[in-house]
């Protein structure tokens, strides 16, 4: 080697820097594609609190009420939603940075793939929804470094998350449990640690049963609740939200059974799957590859099953709710978090999992397809494509109304 000639380590560092820059640019573009003001469903749901007694999904509104935040004003709620979204994306970036994901996964190409994904676009589109709060709780649990405290953080995040919205059980609990499970499988006699994790799962399951299967509100109670909220908000409420609040899990299953018989439901599944499942599949392939290298025998089977559950569990919500693209998009998020957790535990410091030429080409192709994706946003909204003229119009509208956000019509 000639003096001054770049080494393989230098070349890898330069490539990693390039992928970090690409991830930042792609992530900004993907986020701006889905950026929006919160819709009225999200604004209505956030008004729930415990003012008229315990009600599921009321914890978020109760905490904000105790903090003195006036989310009954749509502008205040909108800005708070954007702050929570920005904070959650910041926690996500911090988790990726501290996990060494840029080094571990092909010098950052898979991180750039996630940054370009329609899953991230949809996450930005969910501003105002409780999904953002749930992801924030999950990331806070994942960022706890101490193993013993991490298990407590997983439990606390799950209990709080379920009280915010019972969907936490399927959306993010499995992916927070995975980093606690993998070290247990490394132990020579892991039975005690696995038993402890089993108790943790049981405790969270009981919490879900208490919250999700609490009695449904009667029509009179719903009318009282709706009237109380309408009296203090400066925006029109979504009346159909209160109809959903009065349904049980069994009612949702019955409704979904009817929807599943309709052809358009399966057609939307095909479109959503083509848009987002290839990215999920590449993340899952990477996760399982790392686990196969690290574990053998029954430990490998347990780790593989846990990784599959952590990656794909949001899809189980397809049988309870009809936001098809939403569950696929959140599966992109969980499959990415699963890959990061698997690499963090299974790839020693300094070791990298290289995709190989063919899979790297596939990742680059998927980045291009992700940036071109734009189907399935809520409220029949269209993707805000570069140069994001609709967002510039929103900024001008806010300035013209002295900082107030325009109240949506949906």
Image (cartoon, helix red, strand yellow):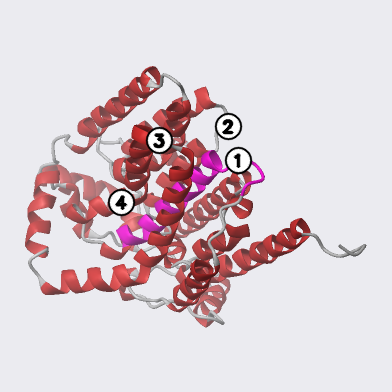
Q: Is residue 231 left or right of residue 187?
A: left
Task: Name the quarter where the C terminus is drawn.
Answer: bottom left
Residues 262 and 188: in front is: 188
Residue nearer the viewer, 72 or 98 = 98
Residue at which label 4 appears: 314
Q: Residues within 10 Å of mark 3 (few under 14, many from 20)?
A: many
Nearer-N-terminus badge (3/1): 3
Residue 177: image tag: 3
Earlier-in-chain disc, 4 versus 3? 3
Vertical arrangement, residue 315 with respect to residue 369, above or below: above
Residue at the limit of the structure toward the right, as seen here: 3
Task: Give the structural element (helix, strand or loop) at label 1.
Answer: loop
Q: Main secondary structure of the magenta part?
A: helix
Q: Quadrant of residue 202?
A: top left
Q: Which mark is residue 145?
A: 2
Please report contact status of discs 2 and 1: CB closer than 8 Å, yes or no.
Answer: no
Q: Who is closer to the viewer here, 31 or 148? A: 148
Give how far across and how far down residue 408 sits, in percent.
37, 69
338 drawn magenta: yes
């Amino acid at each position: 080697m000639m003096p001054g000639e770049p080494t393989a380590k230098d070349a890898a560092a330069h490539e990693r820097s390039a992928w970090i820059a690409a991830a930042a640019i792609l992530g900004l573009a993907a986020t701006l594609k889905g950026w929006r003001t919160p819709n009225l469903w999200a604004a209505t749901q956030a008004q729930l609190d415990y003012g008229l007694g315990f009600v599921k999904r009321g914890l978020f509104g109760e905490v904000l009420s105790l903090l003195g935040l006036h989310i009954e004003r749509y502008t205040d709620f909108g800005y708070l939603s954007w702050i929570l979204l920005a904070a959650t994306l910041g926690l996500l970036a911090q988790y990726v940075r501290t996990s060494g994901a840029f080094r571990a996964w092909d010098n950052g190409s898979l991180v750039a793939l996630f940054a370009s994904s329609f899953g991230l676009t949809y996450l930005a589109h969910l501003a105002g929804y409780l999904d953002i709060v749930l992801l924030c709780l999950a990331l806070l649990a994942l960022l706890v470094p101490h193993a013993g405290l991490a298990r407590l953080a997983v439990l606390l995040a799950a209990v709080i998350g379920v009280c915010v919205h019972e969907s936490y059980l399927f959306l993010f609990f499995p992916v927070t449990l995975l980093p606690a499970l993998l070290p247990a499988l490394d132990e020579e006699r892991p039975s005690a640690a696995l038993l402890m994790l089993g108790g943790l799962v049981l405790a969270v399951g009981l919490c879900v049963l208490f919250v999700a299967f609490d009695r449904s509100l009667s029509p009179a109670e719903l009318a009282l609740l709706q009237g109380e909220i309408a009296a203090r908000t400066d925006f029109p409420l979504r009346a159909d939200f209160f109809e959903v609040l009065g349904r049980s899990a069994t009612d949702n299953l019955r409704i979904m059974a009817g929807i599943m018989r309709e052809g358009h439901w399966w057609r939307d599944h095909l479109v959503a799957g083509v848009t987002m499942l290839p990215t999920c599949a590449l993340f899952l392939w990477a996760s399982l590859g790392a686990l196969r290298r690290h574990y053998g025998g029954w430990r490998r089977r347990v780790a593989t099953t846990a990784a599959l559950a952590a990656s794909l569990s949001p899809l189980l919500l397809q049988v309870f709710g009809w936001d098809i693209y939403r569950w696929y998009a959140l599966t992109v998020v969980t499959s990415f978090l699963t890959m990061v957790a698997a690499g963090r535990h299974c790839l020693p410091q300094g070791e990298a999992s290289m995709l190989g030429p063919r899979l790297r080409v596939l990742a680059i192709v998927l980045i291009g397809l992700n940036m071109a994706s734009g189907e399935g946003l809520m409220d029949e909204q269209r993707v805000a494509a570069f140069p994001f003229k609709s967002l510039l119009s929103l900024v001008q509208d806010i300035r013209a109304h002295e900082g107030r956000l325009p109240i949506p019509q949906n």
